[in-house]
Image (cartoon, grey):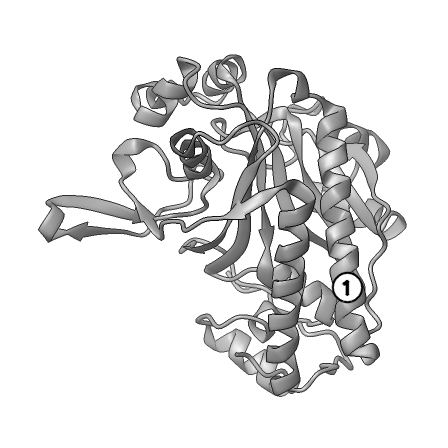
Amino acid sequence: MNRTEIPAGYEAKLSLYETQAAIGLLKRTFQDHLATALNLKRVSAPLFVDPATGLNDDLNGVERAVAFDIPAAKMDAQVVHSLAKWKRMALYRYDIWPGKGIYTDMNAIRRDEDLDNLHSIYVDQWDWERVITKEMRTVQFLKNTVRDIVQCIADASLIVNGRYPRLNTQLPSEVTFVTSEELLQMYPGMTAKERENAFVREHPVTFLMNIGGKLSNGQPHDGRAPDYDDWDLNGDLLYYFPTLDKAIEISSMGIRVDAEALDRQLTLSGCDNRRELTYHKMLLAGQLPLTIGGGIGQSRLCMLLLGKAHIGEVQSSIWDEDTLRKCRDAGVTLL
């Protein structure tokens, strides 16, 4: 389904050439700051995985992975949805100690994604994961990590605005924390996205916590796979995006499930069949390290800092005819 709408009077603040240069500056700057703040080392990551390992991210459980056969290996493979589980296995293989972690460029295809200003079938993000101890599995540690990431984004915005002053999109380093249940009680008559927009308009940098489990209305705020984030220790990092007058999700992250949380969430979500997959067996047996991690959208961050109205202005993808027409009529150039 297509929901692309270009705001009336929108004009890109940078030329096509300046946009490409600014994207390069932003990505280099942010990932260097992130690596320093969270003590991460860059690693190479797969574009596809063996589905039998259980390493692919099932997202909300309904999205279809892009699959293909590999005749030379006599097996099938799936293009990743994200690297949420692969990173944890990598930390186990690399024998990385608590306090250190990894990050990588993650490129994915999500074939069932709706197309609109913020969504593309092509996903590019920085995926990161850090080893922690049992004592670090707390809300306070999660909040401190979020603050570190928000500071990295604020620092990147200062540098990009210094190079391109007419952007005028310097971002604050303060973040407000709120749970999904608190948000429901504040705005009981709204949908989940409406609640996000209403709160973020008043609190321009928000970390919305506890996503995946059912709220008091019997519904989860949003879907989460049961086998990576602990639903009591996770959240989404949201920014107010004035170009579209709405909240934009920059990151989904959290402290990952331990054996107890995985056992509980598999049962709650009706996914007990996953217990026989390699990744899940190892986690339930306590063989994988405790971690915190997440994904930070590269194109989303570029949209936010460069004031772009459509994600196609900062990434190359395929678009339907309606999107192409709306952008063409509004003078919006897609990469």
Which residue occupies 76% across, 34% down?
144
| For residue 257, side relative to residue 13 (left or right) | left
Viewer-proximal residue, 17 or 69? 17
* Above/below status of 95 relative to 29: above
Which residue occupies 41% across, 18% down?
287
Tell me how many marks there are. 1
Viewer-proximal residue, 241 or 286? 286
Using the rendered view, name the quadrant where residue 181 is placed.
Answer: top right
Mark 1 Cα-neighbour bin, 10 Å: few <14, some 14–19, many ≥20: many
Q: Give the amino acid type for the residue marked by disc 1 in the picture.
A: Ser
Where does residue 40 sit, x and y in percent of width and height?
A: 58, 44
* Above/below status of 194 relative to 246: above
Using the rendered view, name the quadrant where residue 229 is placed.
Answer: top right
Is residue 118 visible in the rendered image? The answer is no
Residue that carries the numbered disc 1 in the rendered image? 157
Viewer-proximal residue, 200 or 152? 152
| For residue 191, side relative to residue 72 (left or right) | right
Residue sitting at the far right: 202
Is residue 266 visible in the rendered image? The answer is yes
Which residue occupies 38% across, 32% down?
93
Where does residue 284 sit, x and y in percent of width and height?
A: 42, 15
Using the rendered view, name the quadrant where residue 21 is placed.
Answer: bottom right
| For residue 65, side relative to residue 332 (left or right) | left
Which residue occupies 58% across, 41% down?
294
Helix, strand or loop for disc 1: helix
Where does residue 260 sit, x and y in percent of width and height?
A: 52, 12
* Above/below status of 123 relative to 205: below
